[in-house]
């Protein structure tokens, strides 16, 4: 049974930092991409950041220079370090794991940035 366990969300003031973690278990195929999406109220889900098995990263323009995505392949875990947070970063953040066959999604963790 596949499980994606997210942690690290919460309430933070603007310019603060948070670190999200997502640990995957039960995935039997090789993991290609690991990353994070977010969805704010009334908006579509959007890519925040992802990292490939080869270490290539890409970021949404709105988070470049502030967020850093990384992965620990020994733990099947992906991280999102978020610095200089802004109220516009408020959203539910979803972990995403991609294999050759399908993608898996976490349950989501709320990040709220107050001004």
Image (tube, helix red, strand yellow):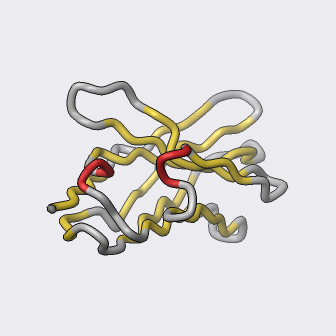
Q: 63 or 18: nearer the eye? A: 63
- Where does residue 21 sit, x and y in percent of width and height? 46, 65
Q: Residue furthest right?
A: 54
Q: 71 or 99: nearer the eye? A: 71
Query: Horizontal placement of 63 versus 56: left or right?
Result: left
Q: 23 or 67: nearer the eye? A: 67
Residue ID at (47%, 47%): 62
- Where does residue 17 sit, x and y in percent of width and height? 35, 73
Query: Horizontal placement of 87 versus 22: left or right?
Result: left
Residue ID at (37%, 48%): 93
Q: Quarter holding the C terminus? A: bottom left
- Where does residue 73 sit, x and y in percent of width and height? 71, 65
Q: Residue furthest left?
A: 115
Q: Quadrant of residue 28?
A: top right
Q: Is residue 70 above or below residue 90?
A: below
Residue ID at (20%, 70%): 13
Answer yes or no: is residue 2 visible.
no
Q: 79 or 17: nearer the eye? A: 17
Residue ID at (42%, 57%): 5
Q: Residue furthest bottom?
A: 16
Q: Quadrant of residue 60?
A: top right
Query: Horizontal placement of 107 versus 49: left or right?
Result: left
Answer yes or no: is residue 19 visible.
yes
Q: Is residue 36 above or below residue 43?
A: below
């Amino acid at each position: 049974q596949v499980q994606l366990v997210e942690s690290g969300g919460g309430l933070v003031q603007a310019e603060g930092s948070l670190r999200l973690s997502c640990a995957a278990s039960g995935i039997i195929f090789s993991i290609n991409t690991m990353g994070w999406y977010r969805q704010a109220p009334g908006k579509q889900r959007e890519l925040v950041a992802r990292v490939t098995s080869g270490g290539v990263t890409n970021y949404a323009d709105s988070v470049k220079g502030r967020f850093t995505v990384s992965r620990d392949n020994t733990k099947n875990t992906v991280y999102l370090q978020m610095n200089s947070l802004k109220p516009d970063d408020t959203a539910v953040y979803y972990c995403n794991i991609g294999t050759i066959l399908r993608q898996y999604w976490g349950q989501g963790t709320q990040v709220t940035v107050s001004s």
